[in-house]
Image (cartoon, grey):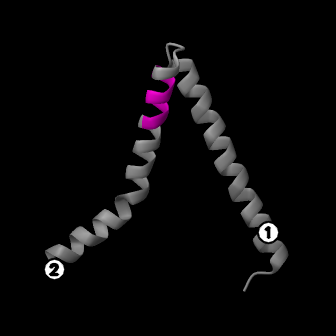
Amino acid sequence: MKSLEERTKREYHRHQVVQKAVEVADRIILDGSDGSIEETNYLTSEVARKFMEKALLPFNTAITRRDLE
């Protein structure tokens, strides 16, 4: 088992990675938006939806594989 210090460092690193990803996505969305709140919200929600689909893919694959057995 890893030490508390190692786990804390890893948790902090993961937090930093997520924070950077959100900042970069926000920048890209704002650069691509027409500047309206509606467009910005739409782009944000579409990016979130794509990430959600990507995150759920392993679960969908597993249940499909199970159904095919």
Out of 65 and 38, give the one closest to the viewer: 38
Instruction: Name the amino acid, label 2.
Output: Glu
Q: Which residue is located at x 17 percent, y 74 percent?
A: 67
Q: Main secondary structure of the magenta part?
A: helix
Instruction: Name the amino acid, label 1.
Output: Thr
Label 1 belongs to which residue?
8
Left or right: residue 9 versus residue 20 is right
Residue positioned most to the left = 68
Residue positioned most to the bottom = 1
Residue positioned most to the top = 34
Q: Which residues are magenta?
A: 39-45
Q: Which residue is located at x 29 percent, y 65 percent?
A: 61
Instruction: Classify 11 as above or below 18.
Output: below
Is the residue marked by circle 1 packed among few (<14), some (14-19), or many (20+) residues within 10 Å?
few
Query: The N terminus appears in which quarter of the rendering?
Result: bottom right
Percent across and percent down for residue 48 are 47, 42
Q: Which residue is located at x 46 percent, y 21 percent?
A: 39
Label 2 belongs to which residue?
69
Query: The C terminus appears in which quarter of the rendering?
Result: bottom left
Residue 28 in magenta? no
